[in-house]
Amino acid sequence: MPTGAEVIREVKGRIDEVDPGTVHADLESGNGNAPVLIDVRESDEFEAGHIPGARHVPRGHLESRIEGAAPDRSQRVVLYCASGNRSALAADTLERLLGYEHVESMTGGITLWKDRGYDVEVPRRLTKEQRERYSRHILIPEVGLEGQQKLLDAKVLLLGAGALGSPTSLYLTAAGVGTIGIVDNDVVDLSNLQRQVIHTTDRIGESKVESAQLTMKALNPDVDVRTFDLRLDASNIMEVLQSEDWDVVVDGLDNFPTRYLLNDASVRLRIPVVSAAILGFDGQLSVFEPYVGPCYRCLFPTPPPAELAPSCGANGVLGVLPGTMGMLSATEAIKLIIGKGDTLTGRLLLYDALAATFTELKVRRDPDCPICSRAPDDITDEEMGVFPDYEAFCAAAG
């Protein structure tokens, strides 16, 4: 029976090893030779310091998590540990058992990397309570400690504390988004409770933003909830959007005039917007990233007919539908924050609850768009939210 040292020598004899200097040069070159860098140490070791850009996949979870960190088996992968032994064993596993084609183990591990004077990133540590609260996030390679820290540092502004804002705010709070702003000037009504799940019966008559804040703080006391008890309009939208360095705006509004105003202001400030809408059994969702994809005006150059506009009079909605669309909105916001996955930028997702179907439509930027075809600084206050007199149109429609 071979000893552990003999097994490691045998493994190192059949895998490829690479010097830290070569890895450092490839990472710094920017010429396309940079490998996928995987740290196979334990979580406490990774938190104490790791190579910048490294993805954390502990060796004990290698087989179950490596595809999330390195999905392309033909891509070059470099593994490292403390000294080069665990990474050698991991490299052997990837090549022989999982079919990875270009795997290398970094000789000397992070110890030799440090000795060479190369940079090491030391992430901020989560508290014991945070590690437990967000443990299921930390286990996901696409999120991990780095992604969870991004969520804790993020600032998200929610427009509306009603049907769509309720599930979105709850799930962003649970996810640990550090600062969440809520804009709404309404009060809780009994008719809201069929779908606005962040409010309760004993809060009827209270401010929606204050009611939402109570629920969110009870769910996660660490989240800083900022309330804006006001109706968003041309006189205050820039002040609200510039009140913090908002990373994402989640639009749960129910009227077209404000949505056009939001679009123009968010393009001007280059803030991405996750926008959802609901009516009856139907929902729709898209992401508008200024100068990356189309804006709201590219999708809707002019408002639809009054009879199709949810804000024109009372419209029914299936109580659970906002839950579906609100959770999808929260998912898109989280993806924007952690920089993972494909967002709905340039795509419109349509959901038919009765048929249980999703339909996706491509949306392209309009080269003649009156807003996003121009530089942000060229958009004036007088132009924002300007379109045919839709408010009067809605009033006339009854």
Image (cartoon, rainbow, N blue to C red):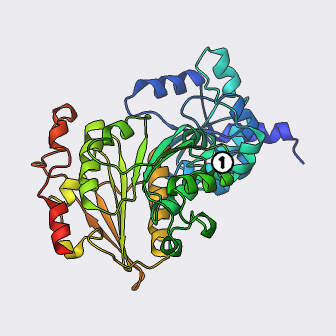
Image position, residue 187 (x, y; %): 48, 60
- Which residue: 37% across, 40% down? 241
- In the image, is residue 122 above or below residue 318? above
Image position, residue 344 (x, y; %): 36, 57
- Which residue: 44% across, 55% down? 332
Say few, some or many: other residues with alpha carbon within 10 Å of mark 1 (under 14 / 14 to 19 / 20 or more): many
Q: Is residue 127 visible?
A: yes
Task: Say how many tags the image has.
Answer: 1
Q: Is residue 174 visible?
A: no
Image position, residue 115 (x, y; %): 67, 15
Is residue 23 rendered to the left or right of residue 112?
A: left
Is residue 101 rendered to the left or right of residue 373?
A: right
Judging depth in this view, the residue of 326 and 26 nearest the camera is: 326
Q: Tag 1, which secondary structure?
A: helix
- Which residue: 39% across, 28% down? 30
Is residue 360 rendered to the left or right of residue 151?
A: left
Circle 1 residue: 138
> Residue type at mark 1?
Ile
